[in-house]
Image (cartoon, grey):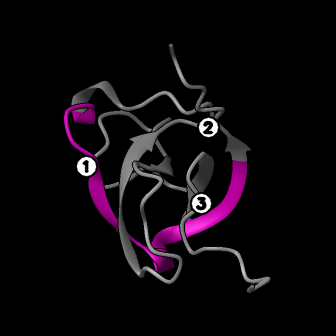
């Protein structure tokens, strides 16, 4: 088993590498990404992510579909989201 973390961790909130908002974001506070799926391969270099704020609130202008994000565009993990299962 590898000790290396996956490139995209589901539930993690990453600041954009630049610290600025994503080019498609509707407001400056949406300067983070969170992976959209648990099923992203460990070594993926591109993955679908939601554009969000530091608390994981998805940009309402982009809430219909996640966008592709390159691994190089991810900054540090700044927060996490708990994805509980509903019964």
* Dot placed on the residue nearer the N-terminal end, 2 or 1: 1
Write down the region rendered in magenta.
62-78
Disc 3 target residue: 9
Residue shown at 28% from the left, 47% from the top = 66
The mark closer to the camera, 3 or 2, is 3
Q: Earlier in the sequence, mark 1 or mark 3?
A: 3
Q: Secondary structure at mark 1?
A: loop
- How packed mark 3 is, by other alpha carbons closer than 10 Å (few <14, some 14-19, many 20 or more), is many
User: What residue is shown at x 72% (from left), y 49% (from top)?
Assistant: 78
**Residue 46 x %, y %:** 36, 75
Residue at the far top in the pictured view = 87
Quarter of the image for residue 82 reads top right
Q: Which residue is mark 2?
A: 54
* Comes first in the chain, label 3 or label 2: 3
Q: Is residue 29 above or below residue 73?
A: above
Task: Describe the element under mark 3 as helix, strand or loop.
Answer: loop
Residue 58 coordinates in the image, percent (x, y): 41, 31
The secondary structure type at the circle numbered 2 is: loop
Count neighbours of disc 1 (C-alpha within 10 A) and say few if under 14, some if 14 to 19, many if 20 or more: few
Farthest residue in the right direction?
3
Q: Which residue is mark 1?
A: 24
Question: Distance between the Cα atoms at labels 2 and 1?
Answer: 17 Å
Calculate the distance from the C-alpha at mark 1 to the C-alpha at mark 3: 22 Å
Judge whether 68 appears above or below 14 on screen.
below
In the depicted structure, whether residue 5 falls above or below residue 84? below
Residue 26 position within the rendered picture, expressed as x and y whole percent measured from the top left = 29, 35
Q: Is residue 6 left or right of residue 29?
A: right
């Amino acid at each position: 088993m590898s000790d290396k973390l996956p490139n995209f961790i589901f539930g993690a909130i990453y600041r954009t590498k630049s610290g600025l908002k994503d080019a498609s974001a509707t407001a400056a506070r949406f300067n983070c990404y969170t992976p959209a799926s648990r099923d992203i391969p460990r070594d993926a270099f591109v993955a679908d992510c939601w554009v969000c704020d530091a608390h994981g609130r998805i940009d309402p202008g982009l809430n219909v579909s996640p966008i592709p994000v390159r691994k190089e565009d991810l900054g540090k993990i700044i927060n996490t989201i708990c994805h509980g299962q509903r019964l």
